[in-house]
Image (tube, rainbow, N blue to C red):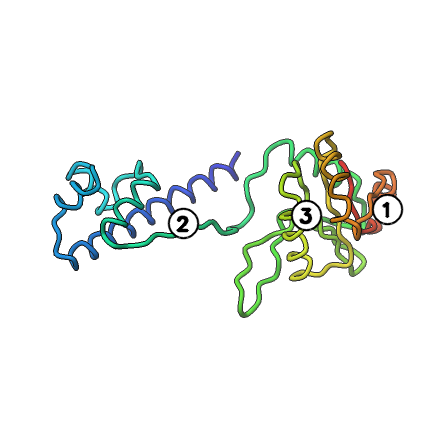
Amino acid sequence: MPAAIKAFDRGTYLGERQLREAGDEFREQRLQLGLSQAFIATACHISRPRYTSIEAGKVPSLTIVEFNQIASVLGLDTSVRLYPAGAPVRDAAHAGRFGVLLGHVRRPLRYGLEVSLPSTRDRFERRAWDGMLYGTGERTACELEMRLRDVQAVRRRIDLKRRDDPTEHFLLLIADTRTNRRVLAEFEALFRDLPRLRPSTVWAALEAGRHPPTGILLI
């Protein structure tokens, strides 16, 4: 899985860089306070060699709890947040279900996977559509949900994407499982603007080289 390996290597690089940056900030703050490494290590209930290595950014086993303990002793606050950073690695089940849709696409339609939303002068865009159908001067954006959990969060994410990258058509693909059917029925009101589509209707449009109607397709 080359994509998974590439993503893993990127994560390793970012983690090592963040460890070095955190160590630099710990050292600068400690020196400003006029404290020794031994004092901070004792206050944090760790050995001095370990703390020395942390300041050097050489402790990949540093936990978030330990990180916050050191920061707190040094009079620093921390913030750990996650942001979209490109396409996530997809598993075989995800690729397989998307492949069912793409297997029906015929010319003049064509498709792309992990299609980035357009960046603007004020925003570098990191989000991407799971797929996009192109042809006849129109586009169909596609999103695939394997398991519906936080339905409201899914709805917000989709609405923001559609706002920032309006397309003529939109397909919300949802894995056809008992759990997903139950959740869809329970939150039917949240998807009133996305009618449930019959697979035969979508397949017929795609095989005729036409964009499918906007809606939800269980796949």
Q: Residue at x 38, y 47 (%)?
A: 14
Mark 3 neighbour density, 10 Å: few (under 14) some (14–19) many (20 or more): some
Mark 2 neighbour density, 10 Å: few (under 14) some (14–19) many (20 or more): few
Report whether 5 appears left or right of 163: left
- Work out whether residue 160 or residue 140 is closer to the camera in this orientation and state it: 160
The residue wearing badge 2 is 80
Helix, strand or loop under label 2 = loop
Q: Earlier in the sequence, mark 2 or mark 3?
A: 2
Q: Quadrant of residue 180?
A: top right
The residue wearing badge 3 is 131
Residue 178, image x and y in percent? 73, 29
Q: Amino acid at mark 1?
A: Ala
- Work out whether residue 106 or residue 202 is closer to the camera in this orientation and state it: 202
Q: Amino acid at mark 3?
A: Gly
Q: Earlier in the sequence, mark 1 or mark 3?
A: 3
Pair 2/1: label in front: 2
Q: Residue at x 12, y 56 (%)?
A: 34
